[in-house]
Amino acid sequence: MNTPSDSCVIATEPTLVSKPWFVYLVRAANGSLYCGISDDPVRRFAAHQRGKGARFFLSSPAVALVYTEACCDRSEALRQERLIKKLRKSAKECLVASYQSG
């Protein structure tokens, strides 16, 4: 007869899987590009279209989500965002072109 002390209970901890984060580029109506990070770039773009979340879009509304890049965590997304923000506009446009053709 099995008693509670006879049975082997293995407690497993849930595996911590970090959700993906994204670095993204949004084109404004005046042609400029805005770079940001989010765990849901489509939802974030919708917020930008409503004028929420970034003062950048007060002068020229968000018109298109033109680039997204998945990162393994928020920290990596922030690093990638810093790198993209340092690029010249022509290099950012190349990112956008490669994303849209791929």
Image: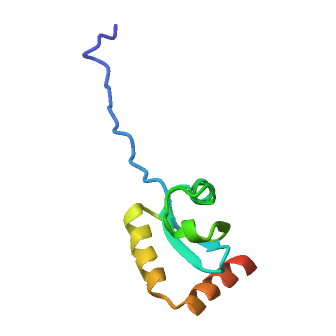
Q: Quadrant of the N terminus?
A: top left
x 57%, y 70%: residue: 59
Q: Quadrant of residue 9?
A: top left
x 49%, y 88%: residue: 87
**Left or right placement of residue 47 versus residue 63 in this view:** left
In this view, which residue lies farthest toward the top?
1
Would you place residue 91 above or below residue 20 in this image?
below
Q: Quadrant of residue 33?
A: bottom right
Q: Quadrant of the C terminus?
A: bottom right
In the rendering, at what x and y percent does residue 47 appear?
A: 58, 55
x 64%, y 74%: residue: 27
In this view, which residue lies farthest toward the front?
59
x 49%, y 63%: residue: 54
In the rendering, at what x and y percent does residue 7 appear?
A: 32, 20
In the rendering, at what x and y percent does residue 51 appear?
A: 57, 58
Would you place residue 28 above or below residue 72 in this image?
below
Q: Nearer the viewer, residue 14 or 1?
A: 14
Residue 69 visible in rendering: no
